[in-house]
Amino acid sequence: LNIALLAGDGIGPEVIDQAVKVSDAVAAKFGHEINWTPALTGAAAIDAVGEPYPDATHEVCVAADAVLFGAIGHPRFDNDPSAKVRPEQGLLKMRQKLGLFANVRPTFTFPSLIDKSPLKKERIEGTDLVFLRELTGGIYFGKRGREDNDNTAYDTCTYTRAEVERLARKGFEMAMQRSKKLCCVDKANVLETSRLWRETVQKLEKEYPEVQVSYEFVDAVAMRLVQWPSSYDVLITENLFGDILTDEASVISGSMGLMPSASLGEKTSLFEPIHGSYPQAAGKDIANPLATVLSAAMMFETAFSLKDEAEAIREVVNKSLSEGVVTEDLADGGKAYKTSEVGDWLA
Amino acid sequence: LNIALLAGDGIGPEVIDQAVKVSDAVAAKFGHEINWTPALTGAAAIDAVGEPYPDATHEVCVAADAVLFGAIGHPRFDNDPSAKVRPEQGLLKMRQKLGLFANVRPTFTFPSLIDKSPLKKERIEGTDLVFLRELTGGIYFGKRGREDNDNTAYDTCTYTRAEVERLARKGFEMAMQRSKKLCCVDKANVLETSRLWRETVQKLEKEYPEVQVSYEFVDAVAMRLVQWPSSYDVLITENLFGDILTDEASVISGSMGLMPSASLGEKTSLFEPIHGSYPQAAGKDIANPLATVLSAAMMFETAFSLKDEAEAIREVVNKSLSEGVVTEDLADGGKAYKTSEVGDWLA
Ligand SMILES: CC(C)[C@H](C(=O)O)[C@@H](O)C(=O)O
Ligand SMILES: CC(C)[C@H](C(=O)O)[C@@H](O)C(=O)O
C-alpha cells in the first residue's frame, strides 16, 4: 500500500505518528506492507520552500494510492487574510490539483461521549449521518475580483451538470449502502446553481428507485441539524453550504475530536481528521489522535477496500474509549494518557 | 402612526390580528392613534391579482411609516421551486423595492422556556445575541443564469463598499447600545466579497474606538453558535450567510415561536415574526401570536422611538408567560388558550 504522508502543522505530526503506528500494526496482522512517503504541506512547507502545497508534494501524492493528512494552519497567518501565501491556499490547491471532488464527513456518536454534546441526550442519541460536500467547484473556484475603482467586489458560483452529477451519484451509492435516504441541500428558491443541482438529482432518482430523496433548503437544514440530527442519513450539497453545515454538524455529537473524513477523487483520495492544527497543544504530546486513527480506518476501507482491517482499527478505538485509555480531553477526571501512549496501546 | 398591515398567508392573519389588538391597546393607553392600512401579499396576493407583491401593496407600504408583516408561503408552491410565480419572490421584491437593507434578528431566552431548547441549559443560559443580516445585496440579487447549452449554471455575489458600510455602521451603532462587542462574520480566507467586508469594517473601527470587534469565519460561527451561543452579542454578516446563521440561531433558544425581527430601510421599516406561515394550523385559532406581538413592540421602539410603549408590550408578554396564558405549543400540560384569547388577555 503506497501512502503519501502529509503531517502538516501544529499537532499534525503527533497525531499522524499514532495513525502510522496503528496502520503498520494492522498491516502486519493482515499481511500487507505499507510504503509511507512523507511530504511537506501548510505552514511547514511555506517555511521550507515558500509554498503551502509544493510541486514535490503534489508528485508524491499523485504517485501514491492514498494520502493520509494531519492538519494545516498556523496562528501566525490568522489575522492576516490578505497575506500573500497562506496555508489554506495549499489546501485549496491540493483539492483542485488532486481532483478531490467529494468530501465525506460523517457525524456519529459514541455512547460514552454523548454527555459531551452541547445538545440534550434525547436530541443527539442515534445520530449517524454523513455529508457529501462538493469540494472542487462552486464559489470557491469561480471568477472573483474587484471592479469600479476597487469599490465593488464579486465572487462567482458556477456548477456544471457533470460536476453535480458525479457528486450526486456518490451520494446515491452511499445511500444504497446505508438506509437509502438521501437529502439534497440547496437554496433552489433563490439560486440558479441550486436549481441545476435539484434538476440533476431529480434525474438521477430514476436510476436509484429504491432511494428516498428529499430536497431541503440550506437554512432549514441548519435548523434541523440542531433540532433533530438523527432524522438525517446521507446529505449532499455544494461546496460553501457544505463548509458551513459540516462544521455545524461536527460539534453536535460531542465527539468532534474523533471525527474522520475522506476527500475522494477519480484517481486518488485523501483522509484526514476534521479537527484543526490546534497550535496551542503542538509538541506537548497531549492531542487526541483518535480522529486521525479513524481516518486511517476510513482509508483502509475506502481506498483499499480492506474492510476487516478498517473494522479492526475501529474496534480497538472503541476499546480504548471503554477502557479509558484516552488523552486528557476525554479523561474526565480519570488518568490522562499521552498522545503517544494512546497510539502505542492501540498498535 | 400610519402602519401598513400585511397579514400574508397561513396563520399570518390570525397572529396579525392579536398584534393589532395589543398595539391599539397600548396606543390608547399612551395617547396615540394608529391608522392601519391592510394590503395583500404572498399566496393570498397571487390568488387575488396574480402577483405576490402587487404594486398596490407597494404603494401602501411606501405611504406608511412602518410595515407590520405576518408570514408568507403556501405548501402548494413548496415542491415546485421553478414555478413561475412564487410567494417568496414577493418577499425578495418587497425587500428590494422598499430598500430594507438591514435584517435585525435577535435570539434571546425566556427563563420559563429554556427547557424547550435542544441545547443543554448551561449552554444556552444567558444567550442574548442579535444578528444584522444584509438583506438587499449579495448573491440574492446578483446576475445569474445558464450557459453552455444549459449545462452550466452560475450565480454572482456582489457587494459595494457603500452597501457594506451602511450595514456595518448599523452594527457598530447597535453594539454601542449593547455591550460594545461586534463580530464580523465572513469567509475572507476564500471570498473577495468577504475581504471587502473585512476591509470596510476595519476602517469603521476607527470611528467607534469603544467597540471591540472580532472577525470570524462563517463555518466557525456555525459551530460556536451551538457550542457557546452566549459568547456572542452583535453579529453582522452578508445576505446568504445571514440566512443560514439566523435560522440556526433561532432554534437554539427554545423560544423560536417568540422571536421577532425587523428589516430596516432608509425610509421605512418592516416588522415580522421569524416563524413561517405554518399552514397546518391556519384558521384553527391555535397559533402562538407572541412573536408577532413582540414584533409590534420592536416597531414601537425602532420605527417610532416609543420605548415605553414597547416596554409595556414586553412586560405583558412576560406576564402571560409567567401566568401561563399561552397557546398549546407552550401550555406544557396546562390549559391551552386560543390565539385570540391570548390576544384579548394581552390587550
Ligand atoms: C480553510 C478553508 C479554506 C477550508 C474550506 O473552507 O474549505 C476549511 O474551512 C475546510 O472546511 O476544510
Ligand atoms: C424565502 C427565502 C427567499 C428567504 C430568504 O432566503 O431570505 C427566507 O429564508 C428568509 O430568511 O426570510
Image: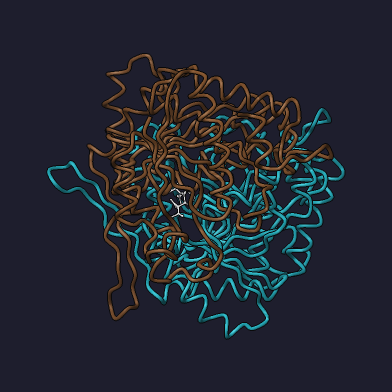
Chain colours: A cyan, B brown
The picture places residue A237, in percent across and down from the top left corner, at: 51, 62
Classify residue B245 as left or right of residue B286: left
Q: Closer to the camera, A209 or B130?
A: B130
Classify residue A299 as left or right of residue B141: right
Which residue is at the far right?
A: A323
The picture places residue A3, in percent across and down from the top left corner, at: 56, 63
Which of the 4 image quarters holds residue A335? Answer: top right
User: In this figure, what is the number of numbered marks?
Assistant: 0
Seen in the picture, residue B338 relative to B50 is either above or below; the reply is: above
Task: Quadrant for the C terminus of chain B, please.
Answer: top right
Which residue is at the far bottom?
A: A207
Classify residue A275 as left or right of residue A100: right
Look at 45% across and 38% down and name the residue there.
Answer: B271
Q: Closer to the camera, B11 or B262?
A: B11
Classify residue B233 as left or right of residue A346: left
Residue A118 in sight in this render: no
Look at 45% across and 67% down and name the residue there.
Answer: A62
Task: Quadrant for the N terminus of chain B, please.
Answer: top left
Which residue is at the far top?
A: B210
Seen in the picture, residue A167 relative to A103 is either above or below; the reply is: below
Look at 26% across and 39% down and name the residue there.
Answer: B163
Which of the 4 image quarters holds residue A132? Answer: bottom right
The picture places residue A96, in percent across and down from the top left corner, at: 39, 62
The picture places residue B139, in percent across and down from the top left corner, at: 34, 53
Look at 37% across and 49% down and name the residue there.
Answer: A89
Residue A273 in sight in this render: yes
Q: Closer to the camera, B251 or A312?
A: B251
